[in-house]
Image (spheres, rainbow, N blue to C red):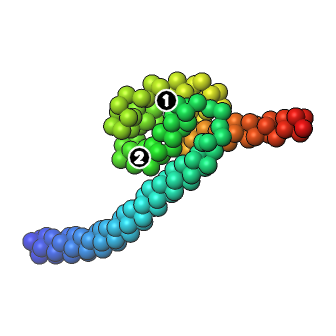
Amino acid sequence: MGSVLVVIGFFLIVVLLVVKIDGLSKEHKRLLSQFKLRDQEASHVQQLTYELAEECSHMLLLQLDQERPTTRLSAHEVVHIEQLCRAIPVICRELVLRPQPIAQALQRYCKKYYADSYTELEVFIHRHGRLIPSWQKNSFAGYLQMCQAAVSLVRELSAKETVKTSRARPEMA
């Protein structure tokens, strides 16, 4: 009688384990499909982020090109702003691949594309005080704000020159 109870107990344990394994298998499949869905969504969002970074870079470069002929900034400083704007998509990808400070991502970009001009860019950023707060945020959003502020700087210096010139002309007449 005792051995029959042991066999029945063993059988019940096996049945419970099979039911539990079946439940775990279904849960695993559900989680796996959720993971695949989330992975696809993440890839899609990542691709959209890259495209937006490209678009942002392109728009800022267009604005820069419009203001370049009339700005009072030196050509060297305008080139620095252009480099910062061109770096947007590359820095975006760098940050997605490996989390790192913005300065490090920009440094890697400069080393790869502009042969050690990182120091010059950093001096440029610190020379123009309005760029520093965005730079110090050490985030991609802060970097975008800094690039926008740099292009705005070119625009404002162009506008001031235009306003001064147009005000000076009536006095001459």
The N terminus is located in which quarter? bottom left
**Element type where label 2 sits in the image:** helix
Vertical arrangement, residue 16 with respect to residue 78, above or below: below
Q: Give residue 26's mark.
A: none
Mark 2 is on which residue type?
Val
Mark 1 is on which residue type?
Leu
Vertical arrangement, residue 49 with respect to residue 149, above or below: below
Residue 28 shown left or right of residue 14 in the figure: right
Instruction: State which mark lies toward you, 1 or 2.
Output: 1
**Element type where label 1 sits in the image:** helix
The image quadrant of residue 125 is top right
Closest to the observer: 23 or 162?
162
Determine the CA span between mark 1 and mark 2: 16 Å
Q: Give residue 121's mark.
A: 1
Q: Give residue 90's mark.
A: 2
Residue 17 lies, in percent from the top left, at 22, 70
Closest to the observer: 17 or 140?
140
